[in-house]
Amino acid sequence: MKLVVVGGVAAGMSCAARTRRLDEHAEIVVLERGEHVSFANCGLPYHIGGTIQERDRLLLQTPASLRRMLGLDVRVGHEVLSISREAKAVTVRDLATGDTYEEAYDKLVLAPGAAPIRPNLPGIDDPRILVLRNVSDMDRIQTVLDAGAKSAVVIGGGYIGIEMAENLKERGLEVDLVEMADQLMTPLDPEMTRPLEAHARWHGVRLHLGAAAAAFTATDDKQLRVELVDGEMLTADLVIMAAGVKPESQLARDAGLDVGERGGIRVDQHLCTSDPDIYAGGDAVEVTDHVMQTPAQIPLAGPANRHGRTIADNLCGGDSIYTTTKGTAIVKVFEMTGGATGTTEKRLKAAGRRYEKLYIHPSGHAGYYPGTATMHVKVLFDPDTGRLLGAQVVGYDGVDKRIDVFATALTAGMTIQDLQHLELSYAPPYGSAKDPVNMAGFVGSNMMAGLVDVWHAEDYPGQTNAGQIIDVRSKAEYESWHIPGARLLPLGSLRDSLDQIDKAKPVFVYCKVGFRSYLAQRLLKQNGFDVRTLSGGSMTFCHTHRTGVCPVSPEAPVVSYAEDKSSCQTEATGRRVDLDLRGLQCPGPIRQLAAALNSARTGDEVCAVASDPGFATDMPLWCRSSGHTLVSVTPRGAETEAIIRKGAPLAANASLTNTKQKTMVVFSGDLDKVLAAFIIANGAISMGNKMTLFFTFWGLNALRKTAPQAGGKAFLDRMFGMMMPKGARRLKLSSLNMLGAGTAMMKHVMRTKNVDSLPSLMQQAMDSGVKIVACAMSMEVMGIKREELIDGIEIG
Ligand code: FAD
């Protein structure tokens, strides 16, 4: 047999090497357009960042080593131009000489991979816009970096974009990452990527989510300006285009082979194309999605390598079958990891498939053993059979092994109930006796058995409005942040508080991660309440809604500690104590830190190590509000080390008292100003402040009911009332109103950027306890009556 292989990397080289192992007498020719074969493309970003220091380590084989070891005829710099199926030959161009020649085959394997997409945008041909697919691309990027590039824009938030952003940061560049979707890593659902996004931001990557590049122009100072669709301008020394890949199927198309709608070469389960003498594999072929059983393009190295092996088996007389691709993928985001297998909720929704889901937040390994942190797990399964549909895991340690266990279970067709019986390896440094995968099985089995009824974060407020939300966490947790409108009934006192819950209305309980609320749910259910527990607790709620300023929320304001360093006013005494906060969950670390600083002297330092991811993001704000100095924050794998210097007592106290009680006077009826007031009020109350908004003069218009109210007013008051906007929905922008067009535009932009509308911000504020006071004196002056104003406010 004479075998010709097009493409000499993952699929192509796996196929050539196994064919040799199975058939010593085959003539095997590998034609590769590029300068290298069998290189580690997945390692390219890490050589750019410096983690893989030696370039040669990426070059796994050379044509000479492949000839020596396997007797392969490997020709680099040889591009296949066309296929003649009748003549069973390919036309090849030697790129060094420009000569073309024919190469005959008995069997042909197409493994040309997928090419990076370069969207057809103005300025796209600028030489500073680079892609990363092979070693030559990597060398080009290295040259630009070595020449002193200081800033980069990465287009695309998939794994190549993320890896490039991280590695460019490692090289000390300023990095902007632009992603069209409203999330990084689209193989995960958006609420699962929030911790990854917060972590990338914390490392200084400026994320532009839900944004797309529109044009590229050169600036006078030799930089490149990237214009985004929303008009924002970014400037950088180079652009990395990582906006996805498209299968290289033109050769196959030109030869009349079947090609799918997504551009992938069509193959059967033996990976044979529509021509029995031509096989194809890797990123260039269309695969079958395991869960959806539909055609899909899933460009990953694992499937590509296994394709190569399957094809070789079949070429050498075997009967090897490649069934489906699960899309099992994983990405490193600085110290964090995110992975997925199977399908996502958004794809199930789009396909109209029935599904159930659960969230858990265990730790990567036993909480008492150092080096672990919270892990976020989401599992999707069939509500009727329990069969697994997909799983997503985000965290610090042990994400990879959980994803791989889920992927194996998915391949084996297991159910959510089966997961509880998996016997997984355990010792404290590696896992827990109840592994996160078992835990998902326990929770899912309870759901399938009807022992637990869940509600999900997105049921708020639509469904929860018809019932009562009860927070069963502690008072301190509730005061630190709670779901707007929720009532506090801590689990410990719940049995004695049953008479405070309305039995006629559904009860929606929640806690931080779902365990305490599960206990509460069992208690209430057995007492005759119609009750549901929030899957994933407030942690998943914050990830889903992105509005809560929960201490563990990825949206908690991120302040660079460098900022705090500059405000360092206290002289160090040179005394430093170590504080181990590992294993403690928020707000535990902050509480213990506060206690340690209380017993220290001004200028003493505490070196605290915590495993709660919220610790790193909370620290700058907490230090600022408590008058201490944050000397440094350093990520150490799953943990964070922070050095805090105790501030002078007076400064600390002054700062604390200042933040606890706030009143804002709203005397403007302009939409933008009233919006700002409510956004600030909602943020402040979530941070534990008591907030009052005092509405006076034109500000009162925001509180007016929209519908006309009963008459009984003097003529002048009536006229005045008709001239003024009635309520939050009718307010206009202070400038650029443009006869209402500007206001409509602003409302549209707010909707698309997921900023709540003014009425919804007002409702949230009132639900979470912001006191709203209407000024009696202004009401009198403006002829506004109490019944014209919305309910739930005070007159003062
Ligand atoms: P390729 O590996 O792309 O090889 C195809 C080869 O065919 C190319 O070298 C091309 O030059 C050659 N070719 C094309 N047309 C012709 C022609 N007409 N004549 C001759 N030669 C031709 N996947 C993961 O699962 N995990 C990861 O972490 C990961 N990281 C990655 C990081 C980077 C930077 C990149 C670029 C990819 C990464 N991938 C990763 C994807 C993975 O590398 C691909 O899925 C895999 O390489 C696909 O293998 P393939 O053989 O189909 O194509």
Image (cartoon, helix red, strand yellow):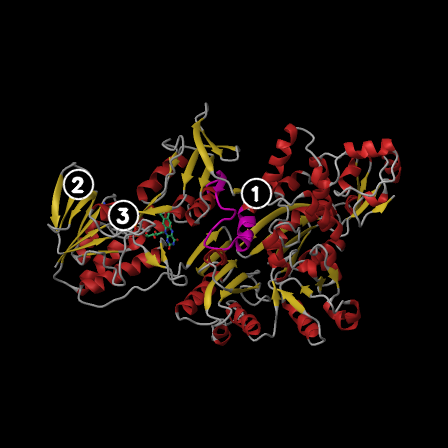
Q: CA distance from mark 1 to mark 2?
A: 50 Å
Pinpoint residue 36: horizontal percent, then vertical percent. Answer: 26, 46
**Quarter of the figure with residue 722:** top right
Q: Mark 1 is on which residue type? A: Thr
Q: Locate the N terminus and report the quarter of the image it occupies.
A: bottom left
Q: Mark 2 is on which residue type? A: Arg
Residue 249 image label: 3
Res 736 seen here: no
Q: Residue at x 67, y 74 (%)?
A: 522
Can residue 174 be found in the magenta stretch?
A: yes
Q: CA distance from mark 1 to mark 3?
A: 36 Å
Observer-side mark, 1 or 2, equals 1
Residue 704 image label: none
Residue 93 image label: 2
Viewer-proximal residue among 192 and 707 = 707
Proximity of marks 1 and 3: CB atoms separated by less than 8 Å: no
Observer-side mark, 3 or 2, equals 3
User: Is residue 231 positioned above or below 461 on the image?
Assistant: above
Pinpoint residue 189: horizontal percent, then vertical percent. Answer: 51, 55
Q: CA distance from mark 3 to mark 2?
A: 18 Å
Res 766 seen here: yes
Residue that mark 1 sits on: 752
Pinpoint residue 154: horizontal percent, then vertical percent. Answer: 45, 40
The secondary element bearing badge 2 is classed as strand
Proximity of marks 1 and 2: CB atoms separated by less than 8 Å: no
For label 3, the crowd category at 10 Å Cα-Cα, with few meaning under 14, some 14 to 19 and many 20 or more, is many
Q: Is ligand 1 closer than 8 angstroms to the Cβ of mark 1?
A: no
Observer-side mark, 1 or 3, equals 1
Residues rendered magenta in the picture: 171-200
